[in-house]
Amino acid sequence: MLPSSQMYYGTLCVAGLALGGLGVWCMHFIGTLALQLPVAVHYSLDTTLLSLVAAVLASICGLGIVAANPYSLPRLVCAGAILGVGVSAMHYLGMYSMEFDGFFLWDWPLVALSCLIAFVAATAGLWLAFATSSNTARWLAAALIGGAVCAMHYTGMAAAEVVCTTPVTALPESDSLGMLTALPVLLVMLIVVISFLIALVHMYARRFKT
């Protein structure tokens, strides 16, 4: 039976932060920065942080539901739906945070397909991670979820047609890429430090039990 202790919930939060923050949001944010538009692009800090919160909370909730005892198919589907919705919300909030002289025209069938990819792949990845006990399956789960996030991201990007409302003759300067890129880098460093501390706590806890 899984322990219902503060250590368990702390580990769950770190896992959600690693999956939602490091695995999902950082990939999305860096991928979005790779998009070059013929107009100056600025990013709303509030909406950008909200997209991060959506990814992390969905990851924590999804992992918490599917990891609860006893394991069941309804829990798996519910967790996959929550994680899929969280990833989709994170992506489109991130795109909504882009401020420029223009707007997006959406291909709604592709938008729906991107959300479906997020749900199906998240459910399959969680099943591989929790319904099987082999390390190979867990590595496959990590690869599947990572690939699904990329597929969802670029499907969502393909669903957006950029319409500029001002004429452009040269590629303008956007927000400082150095400052923007520092956000995911700092987040990665924070997750690594927290994960290391959690691992130390687990190690000392096992020593005291023996």
Image (cartoon, rainbow, N blue to C red):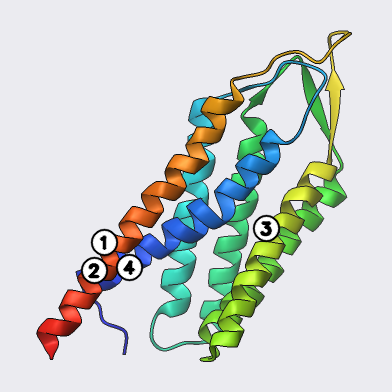
* Mark found first going from the N terminus, 3 or 4: 4
Pointers 2 and 1 in contact (CB under 8 A)?
A: yes
Say what amino acid the circle numbered 2 marks.
Leu
Left or right: 142 with respect to 208? right
Whichever of labels 1 and 3 marks the residue nearer the N terminus, that label is 3
Position of residue 2 relative to residue 33, above or below, is below
Residue visible at 44% across and 73% down? 65
Viewer-side label of 4, 2: 2
Residue to which mark 4 is pinned: 11
Residue 170 numbered tag: none
Cα–Cα gap, marks 3 and 2: 30 Å
**Contact between labelled residues 2 and 4, with CB atoms less than 8 Å apart:** no
Q: Which mark is residue 149?
A: 3
- Name the secondary structure under disc 1: helix
Circle 3: element type: helix
Q: Residue 101 occupies which quadrant of the picture? A: top right
Q: CA distance from mark 1 to mark 3?
A: 28 Å
Q: Which residue is mark 1?
A: 197
Q: Earlier in the sequence, mark 4 or mark 2?
A: 4
Q: Residue at x 31, y 90 (%)?
A: 1
Front residue (pair 108, 166)? 166
Which dot marks residue 200? 2
Rendering coords of residue 31 (x, y %): 69, 43
Q: Amino acid at mark 4?
A: Thr
Q: Is 175 displayed left or right of 188 in the figure?
A: right
Q: Position of residue 28 (x, y in %)?
A: 64, 46
